[in-house]
Image (tube, grey):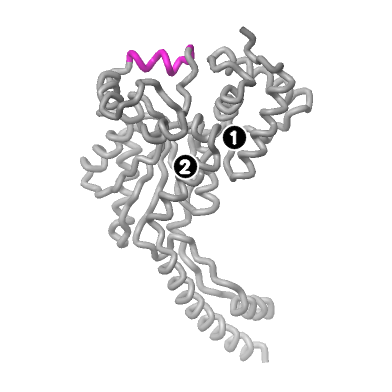
Amino acid sequence: MKLAPKGWNSVIERALEVCLELKKEGIEPTLRSIFYRLSSEGFLIHTQNAYKVLSKKITEARLKGFFPWGLLVDTSRDQFLGKDHLLLLPIDGIATIALERAKEWIRSEVKPPLWYGQPYHVEIWVEKDAVVGYFTFVNKEWQLTIFPSRGFSSSTWMYKKSREFLGLIRSGKKIVVLVAVDFDPSGYSEGGIFQTYKRYMDHFGIPVKFVHLMIKPEQIRKYDLPQVPPGSPSYRRIVNDPRYKSWLRLCLEEGIEPKPVELDAFCGLYPKEFKETVLREIKKWFDESLYKQVVKKLEEKRKKEAEGWVKKIEELLR
């Protein structure tokens, strides 16, 4: 059986189209998400070998100038910080240019960080650094922190996060963490990543509301998400996972076939629905009316402060 039934030229052309589609949604595409889309559309067969050859063919297309280098991302394990910690600073400086800037402040619109004055501090934790690109729109549009834990995060890092959360709690915030993991034994099962996050914070005495964002059984059923390609190293590791039996029980309880499903499948096949799922959960914790009140209050404070500086500067320039 051919790995690319419609030919590799068609595969590369369609891959380019899918990348641009995901970019339009504010989602950074990865090779994995593109593979899921192409295999579902019949451009590739759904195997690990086809995935490897796709990688090779796209590299060749890039080197020949047929496929832009910047379209696909391969993220590293960095933390993308939100703006919850930012403070609005007062106007300073006395000079003619300072006078003009003070007047501009009076006329300009105040845009404090979105979560400034909100009762909740919300973060998104993802299982793999490779999928961080799918959530960058959250960082850009909603100013949230995205943390790629790369599987089971170290106890040292979890302690560090607990201290960060403790500081936020003392400032009056409630902590909410949205968790995105693959549907497999290590992602969501007794002793899996999701449960491990919770146990660590319970151990440190930090009250955190953990929300299982994806991948969930109901999402697999609703969108008919495909399993990990047979032959994939991750597929082979699943049977030997010590949490495998626990995961099987979960699948039985949910009435779903015990097949692993990756985050990449959801994002690659249904980018709009993927984004809507994320935004719907975020908006549950964001108070729009409260934000407008904060903006109004800061505008009044800033305007009064700026007018005071204008008066002082004008006196000095006389």
Quadrant of the image for the C terminus? bottom right
Q: Residue at x 53, y 67 (%)?
A: 111
User: Closer to the camera: disc 1 or disc 2?
Assistant: 1
Residue 244: image location, x then y, percent: 30, 19
Taking the spot 39% from the left edge, 65% from the top edge, the residue there is 117
Q: Is residue 248 above or below residue 156?
A: above
Q: Which residues are magenta?
A: 231-240
Please tell me whether mark 1 sits on a helix, a strand or a loop: loop
In percent of width and height, residue 140 lies at: 55, 51
For label 2, count other residues whose C-alpha is less than 10 Å away and answer few (under 14), some (14-19) or many (20+): some
Q: Decide whether residue 234 is among the magenta residues.
A: yes
Residue 293 seen in this snapshot? yes
At 49% across and 53% down in the image, what residue appears?
143
Give the residue pinned by disc 2: 79
Q: What amino acid type is highlighted by mark number 1? A: Pro
SS assignment for the magenta stretch, majority:
helix
Q: Quadrant of the N terminus?
A: top right
Q: Which mark is residue 29?
A: 1
